[in-house]
Image (cartoon, grey):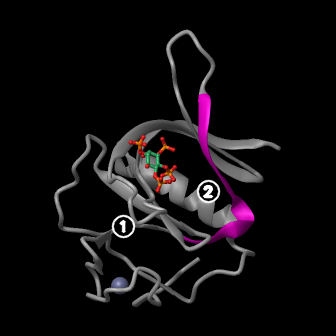
Amino acid sequence: PRVILRGTMIKKSQQKKRTSPCNYKERFFVLDTQNLKYSERRPGKKPMVKGCIELHRIKCVEIVCTEVPIPCNFKYPFQVFHDNHYLYVFAPDNDCRQRWVRALKEETKHNNLVAKYHPNFWMDGKWRCCQQTEKLAAGCHVYDP
Ligand code: 4IP
Ligand code: ZN
C-alpha cells in the first residue's frame, strides 16, 4: 500500500475497557491507502506497532473544538471514530492537523460514515458538546465528510 502521510503526534488512550488508564503517548503515525498505524519509536531498535485501524472501519474524522486545556505538549486535537472507539490524536500545529484530517477524510469518504458527530471531547463521562452521558450517543453536529 502507498504511504500517504507519516509523522509524530500524541494520542490519548482509547479506553476500550472500563479499567483502561487515561494517558497520552507520543507515537509515530503512518497513513497508507489501507490503514492508519501508530508505533512506538525505540532508540536503536525498529519501531513497535501499537495500533492499526483499517480505514474502512472509520466512521468520522474531524478536528476537536474545545475550550478545555490540552494536557499534553501537542495542542491541536482531532478525532478518529472507528469500531465504536474514539481515537484522539494531538498534532503539533494547525497545519499538520489539517493535513491529517484532510487526508483521512479523503481516504474514508466512501465509508459508512456518521450523519452527525461530536465536535468536542468525551470527558469525565459526558460529551462536552451536548452533555449526553452515553459515549456512543448519536452526534450533535452535522458531519461534513
Ligand atoms: C495503554 O496504557 C496505552 O495508552 C495504549 O496506547 C492504549 O491503547 C491502552 O488503552 C492503554 O491502556 P499503558 O501503556 O499505561 O498500559 P498505545 O497502544 O499507543 O501504547 P490504545 O487502544 O489507545 O492504542 P486500551 O483502552 O486499548 O487498553
Ligand atoms: Zn455532542
State whether residue 27 is above or below residue 68. above
* Image quadrant where residue 9 sits: top left
What is the crowding at mark 2: few (fewer than 14 residues within 10 Å), some, or many (at least 20)?
Answer: some
- Are dots 1 and 2 in contact, CB under 8 Å? no
In the rendering, at what x and y percent does residue 68 appear?
Answer: 18, 64
Residue on which the image places disc 1: 64
In the rendering, at what x and y percent does residue 107 appear?
Answer: 70, 62
Q: Is residue 107 left or right of residue 72?
A: right
Q: Secondary structure at mark 2?
A: helix
Q: Is residue 16 left or right of residue 68?
A: right
State whether residue 28 is above or below residue 138. above
Q: Nearer the viewer, residue 59 or 33?
A: 59
Q: Secondary structure at mark 1?
A: loop
Q: Label the magenta part by its dominant secondary structure.
A: strand
The C terminus lies in quadrant: bottom right
Q: Is residue 119 left or right of residue 144?
A: left
Residue on which the image places disc 2: 103
In the rendering, at what x and y percent does residue 89 appear?
Answer: 43, 53
Question: Is residue 59 located in the magenta-colored stretch of the structure?
Answer: yes
Amino acid marked by disc 1 = Val
The N terminus lies in quadrant: top right
State whether residue 77 is above or below residue 127. above
Is label 1 or label 2 in front? Answer: 1
Range shown magenta: 48-60
Q: Nearer the viewer, residue 47 or 100?
A: 47
